[in-house]
Amino acid sequence: MKLIFPYDNDNIYTGTPIELYPDSETGDYMMPPNAADFPPEINGEGMWRPFFDEEKQEWVETADEAYKDSLKKDTAPDPNQLAGLGGQLANEKLARKAAEQAQQSLGRQLASLKLEFLNVKGE
């Protein structure tokens, strides 16, 4: 088995390597069209939008700065989201505390019932 790196009709890498297995009769790998047998990298580093140049048999970076910027996510958190998450966390903590208190109360009630049962039984 070896990995191959397919590209679409525009020669742009599809983004997912595929496992290629040898032919069961010949043992040879039958390379499909629109695929390279080496990853889309330049100097060992990945690419943003790899294009396969069939004539030169190499991957070429086609992403400009505008394309790269369009893929970058805003890393600053949204204050409204943070406030909402803070409220959810506070509610969760209150609910957990209430559940712990209820569990303790049930434990005390159970212990009391056991004692009462033992007293009624005469042990």
Image: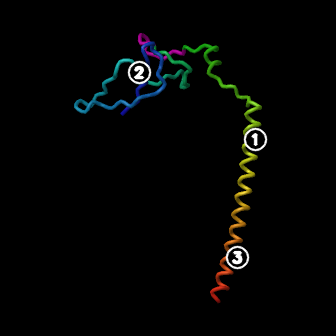
Q: From where the camera sits, is residue 45 visible?
A: yes
Check if mark 3's residue and mark 1's residue have beta carbons within 8 Å. no
Question: Label for residue 52?
Answer: none
Location of residue 105 in the rendering, given as x and y in whole percent from the top left corner: 72, 66
Left or right? Give the position of 35 relative to 94.
left
Q: Nearer the viewer, mark 3 or mark 1?
A: 3
Q: Which structural element holds mark 2? A: strand
Q: Which residue is mark 1?
A: 86
Q: Which residue is mark 3?
A: 112
Location of residue 114 in the rendering, given as x and y in whole percent from the top left corner: 65, 78
Residue shown at 73% from the left, 33% from the top? 81
Q: Nearer the viewer, mark 1 or mark 2?
A: 1
Q: Quadrant of the C terminus?
A: bottom right
Boundaries of the magenta span: 53-61
Separation of marks 1 and 2 at Cα, in angstroms: 49 Å
In primary-sequence order, the first of circles 3 and 1 is 1
Amino acid type at image mark 1: Gly
Question: Label for residue 36?
Answer: 2
Q: Seen from this angle, which residue lies furthest top?
A: 55
